[in-house]
Image (cartoon, grey):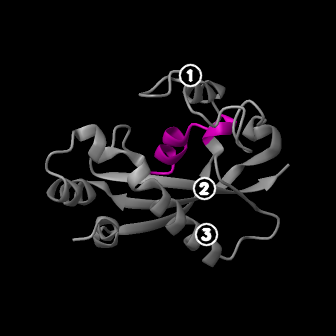
Amino acid sequence: MEEDSILHHVNIQFFFFSAVAIQDLKMIAFCRTPYPKHPRGCPNWNYKEGCPPQTKPFLNLYLPGVRVVIAQMDFGRYLTLKKQRHPDWTERALRNPLHWQGHLRAKLNMYVSSLEIPPGFEIVDNPEAMGINIFETCHRADFDLERNPTLFVCKIKFLSKPR
């Protein structure tokens, strides 16, 4: 099996539902949480458009009623296939988002581009960078996300109406 073909053997499902955005500005602090090889947190901080501290709080810009668009990948299957392909890799190496995140993001972008965006709504690519608690927002809409994923990983966008 070729390296990149693993992702073509993993199921991706799409979900589209209404929710009320739950803002908690403490979420932005997660962008500064250190992780391996990034002692200052996310390298996009103060660099990438749409990332803090350049962003404004979500509810200052958008109404709380949103449409949530999710691409959900079968991460358990992905990890199984990846481990078969690379049995000597560590768990951290197998889970490395650099190997799957771009593929999932591209699938989500294709799905969103196929949707009929309601008039007056905008696509928000990174609501958590604007202080939205994605876990709580989805939970209150009866869609639970895994915090330390073993079964599924998700990429999420909002369709939101500006104030």
Q: Secondary structure at mark 3?
A: helix
Residues in magenta?
A: 128-143
Q: Residues within 10 Å of mark 3 (few under 14, many from 20)?
A: many
Q: Amino acid at mark 1?
A: Arg
Task: Please determine whether, in this image, residue 7 is positioned above or below residue 98.
Answer: below
The amino acid on which the numbered mark 2 sits, given as a three-letter code, is: Lys
72 relative to 160 in the view: left or right: left
Residue 143 seen from this side: no
Q: Give how far apart the Cα atoms at labels 3 and 2 are.
A: 9 Å
Label whose residue precedes the other's in the sequence (3 or 1): 1
User: For this rendering, which residue is in front, 39 or 154?
Assistant: 39
Disc 2 secondary structure class: strand
Pointer 2 residue: 157
- Residue 35 is situated, as x and y percent measured from the top left of the image, at 44, 27
Query: How many numbered discs sit on the rendered protein?
Result: 3
Which of the 4 image quarters holds residue 92?
Answer: top left
Predominant secondary structure, magenta span: helix
Residue at 45 percent of width and 54 percent of height: 101
Query: Between disc 3 and disc 2, whose residue precedes?
Result: 3
Q: Residues within 10 Å of mark 2 (few under 14, many from 20)?
A: many
Q: Secondary structure at mark 1?
A: loop
Q: Is residue 149 inside the magenta stretch?
A: no
Disc marking residue 112: 3
Let me know if residue 106 appears in the view: yes
Which sits earlier in the primary sequence, circle 1 or circle 2? Answer: 1
Q: Which residue is mark 1?
A: 40
| Crowd rating for badge 1 (residues with CA inside 10 Å; few <14, some 14–19, many 20+) | few
Disc nearest the viewer among 1 and 2: 1
Q: Are marks 3 and 2 in contact (CB under 8 Å)?
A: yes
Residue at the location (70% across, 33% down)? Answer: 52
